[in-house]
Amino acid sequence: MDRLLNVTTVLSILLLIMVLVSVRRAHIRVEYSVSWLLTGVAMLLLSRSRPVLDLITRWAGVPDTPLTLFLISGALFLVMFFRFSVIISHLRDDNVALAQRVAILEYHIHSLENHER
């Protein structure tokens, strides 16, 4: 069990480093990095606080502590993926609206050019 917690700790630290480097290099926007940072910190804290993890295991009725850790990490990532799906959907809708506005503007420009001739 301790080995699994150590691996989870290393992976959490790697995630935090990757996110911070990505923010520094402007590969990811700050508002999107917050959820990744929170997830990394949550996984780091859970992997380093065995009593809290044992308490959650007993409370949830999960038969094994490592399973609890992976269930929590899976749930955190599912929530993040849902959040990013919502963001992508909004961006797609905004992109369609923008393309429609550009098409309308191009139509008006062409109609003005035809009236000048």
Image (cartoon, helix red, strand yellow):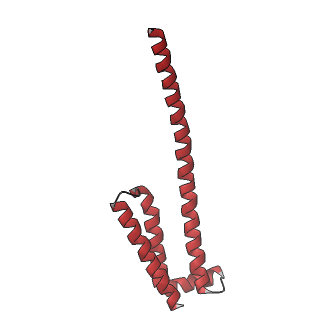
Q: Position of residue 34 (x, y in %)?
A: 43, 62
Which residue appears at 60% of the width and 76% of the height?
71
Q: Is residue 111 above or below residue 64?
A: above
Q: Position of residue 115 (x, y in %)?
A: 47, 10
Image quadrant containing the N terminus? bottom right
Give 29 or 102, whichever is nearer the viewer.
102
Residue, far bottom: 2
Q: Is residue 37 visible?
A: yes
Which residue appears at 56% of the width and 80% of the height?
69
Which residue appears at 57% of the width and 74% of the height?
72
Q: Is residue 36 above or below residue 58?
A: above
Q: Is residue 49 visible?
A: no
Q: Position of residue 109 (x, y in %)?
A: 46, 20
Residue, far left: 24
Which residue appears at 49% of the width and 24% of the height?
106
Give 9 or 109, whichever is nearer the viewer.
109
Image quadrant containing the C terminus? top left
- In screen coordinates, is 84 left or right of 29? right
Quarter of image, res 31: bottom left
Q: Position of residue 53 (x, y in %)?
A: 54, 83
- In screen coordinates, is 64 left or right of 19? right
What is the count of numbered marks?
0
Q: Is residue 107 above or below residue 5?
A: above
Give 13 or 52, whichever is nearer the viewer.
13
